């Protein structure tokens, strides 16, 4: 049961890291567009 909980936590943390990476890429692209204009 503890092993399953650890796996779920790792998957959840991985999803949060993935969403954070995508959000940072989108924000960086938006700042580039603003700088270009």
Image: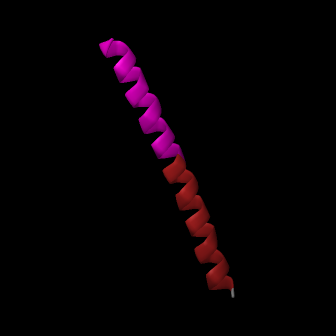
Hey, which residue is sitting farthest front in the picture?
Answer: 1
> Horizontally, is 37 left or right of 17 in the view?
right
Residue at image x 68%, y 84%?
Answer: 36
Residue in the foreground of this view, choosing between 16 and 25? 16
Image quadrant of residue 34?
Answer: bottom right
Image quadrant of residue 26?
Answer: bottom right
Residue at image x 63%, y 68%?
Answer: 29
Q: Main secondary structure of the magenta part?
A: helix
Image quadrant of residue 13?
Answer: top left
Q: Is residue 3 magenta?
A: yes
The tally of labels here is 0
Q: Is residue 22 magenta?
A: no
The segment highlighted magenta reads 1-18
User: In the picture shown, does residue 37 fall above or below 28?
Assistant: below
User: In the picture shown, does residue 10 fall above or below 31?
Assistant: above
> Horizontally, is 29 left or right of 10 in the view?
right
Could you tell me residue 7's position as x and y percent? 41, 21
Residue at image x 57%, y 68%?
Answer: 28
Hey, which residue is sitting farthest left in the picture?
Answer: 2
């Amino acid at each position: 049961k503890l092993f399953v909980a650890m796996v779920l936590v790792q998957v959840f943390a991985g999803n949060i890291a993935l969403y954070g990476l995508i959000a940072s890429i989108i924000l960086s692209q938006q700042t580039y567009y603003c700088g270009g204009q």
